[in-house]
Image (tube, rainbow, N blue to C red):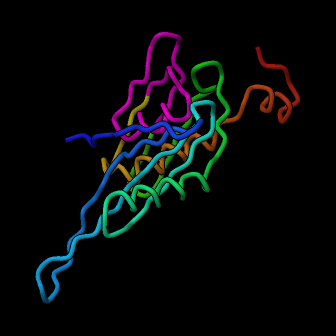
Amino acid sequence: MPPKTKERQQGELSEVVVKIKRCSAVVKGGRRFSFAALVVVGDKKGKIGLGYGKANEVPPSVEKGRKQGMRSMVTVPLEGSTIPHKVVGVYGGAKVVLLPASEGTGVIAGAAVRAVCESAGIHNILTKSFGSNNPVPLVKATIEALKQLRPKSEVERLRGVTLS
């Protein structure tokens, strides 16, 4: 079953709760539950962050995840409504391939990768994930892939050539 996402606008940042995990510990009086929330924060203009908050209730864990996501923001170079080139991101057992797509394609991705791409402001992209289908390493692998992106102007400058 794919993870359910819940999106909220907070100022200019959008926050998507990708996954909420419930953990239980057996104690003397019964079971004690705690919650972990995987939250993706983005401004839909090329900035993205990931937060993983843990608490005894769901709202505080989401809030902790949102705060951590805001602190861990990275900038993604966009080319219109897609990415400049193909990239592969790996994190643990998850591998994510991101391909630029033409206008009108939309976001072709699973729920975890889709949350990251939409929060970053990518509207046309093709993705494929290999290995783990756990949302935590999938989101981290997607962000690793987005960190590898370079705009065309930077590649031209580094190589000392003009690309068509």
User: Quick check: 64 left or right of 18?
Assistant: right
| Residue at the far top in the pictured view | 104
Residue at position x 86%, y 24% in the image:
161
Nearest to the observer: residue 70 or residue 138: 70
Can you tell which quarter of the image residue 8 is in? top left
Give the percent coordinates (x, y) of residue 102.
Answer: 53, 12
Can you tell which quarter of the image residue 157 is in? top right
Give the percent coordinates (x, y) of residue 67.
Answer: 54, 57
Does the magenta run of residues contain 40? no
| Residue at the far right in the pictured view | 160
Residue at position x 53%, y 11% in the image:
103
User: Is residue 153 placed above or below 70 in the rendered structure?
Assistant: above
User: Is residue 64 placed above or below 39 in the rendered structure?
Assistant: below
| Residue at the far bottom in the pictured view | 28
Can you tell which quarter of the image residue 111 is in? top left
Give the percent coordinates (x, y) of residue 164.
Answer: 76, 13
Residue at position x 51%, y 35% in the image:
119
Residue at position x 72%, y 30% in the image:
151
Which residues are the magenta region? Answer: 97-126
